[in-house]
């Protein structure tokens, strides 16, 4: 399954969005640091409030998001376009 992660462009940053994948709800928290001119994202699993990823968003960047216990890849984040905040779940 491939889909774009939720982001409301009219709201801007910071912004928290929820998304569901394989019946598991995750939260994505987007932030922008104007001093460093970079966007960051934190991804948490809602059910047990475990942070799965925190890092900067760079166009063309792939990152496997893994389970904190089993190290199994849950999904992959792909940053396609930062201007439109187009971050994909692959």
Image (tube, grey):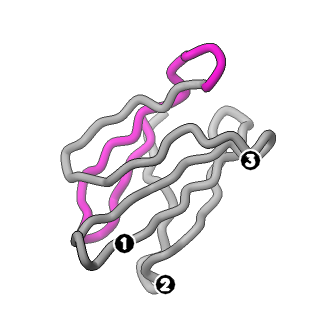
Please report the residue visible at 44 percent of the width from the left and 85 percent of the height from the top. Answer: 10
Residue furthest right in the image:
47
Please report the residue visible at 36 percent of the width from the left and 72 percent of the height from the top. Answer: 32
Alpha carbon separation for disc pair 3 and 2: 22 Å
The one of 50 and 17 positioned closer to us in this rendering: 50
Residue corresponding to mark 3: 46
Sequence-first tag of 3 and 1: 1
Characterize the local packing of mark 1: few (<14), some (14-19) or many (20 or more) Cα atoms within 10 angstroms.
Answer: some
Q: Quadrant of residue 71?
A: top right
Mark 2 lies on a secondary structure that is loop
The answer to whether residue 85 is magenta is yes
Alpha carbon separation for disc pair 2 and 1: 12 Å
The one of 79 and 23 positioned closer to us in this rendering: 79
Sequence-first tag of 2 and 1: 2
Residue 89: % across, % down: 44, 41
Residue corresponding to mark 2: 11
Please report the residue visible at 26 percent of the width from the left and 63 percent of the height from the top. Answer: 82
Which of the labelled discs sits on residue 32, or is there none? Answer: 1
Residue 17: % across, % down: 60, 63
Q: Nearer the viewer, mark 3 or mark 1?
A: 1
């Amino acid at each position: 399954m491939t889909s774009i992660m939720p982001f409301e462009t009219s709201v801007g940053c910071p912004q928290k969005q929820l998304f569901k994948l394989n019946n598991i709800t995750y939260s994505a928290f987007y932030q922008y640091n104007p001093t460093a001119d970079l966007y960051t994202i934190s991804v948490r699993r809602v059910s047990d409030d475990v942070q799965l990823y925190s890092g900067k968003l760079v166009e063309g960047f792939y990152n496997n998001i893994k389970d904190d216990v089993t190290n199994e890849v849950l999904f992959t984040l792909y940053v396609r376009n930062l201007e439109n905040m187009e971050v994909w779940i692959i």
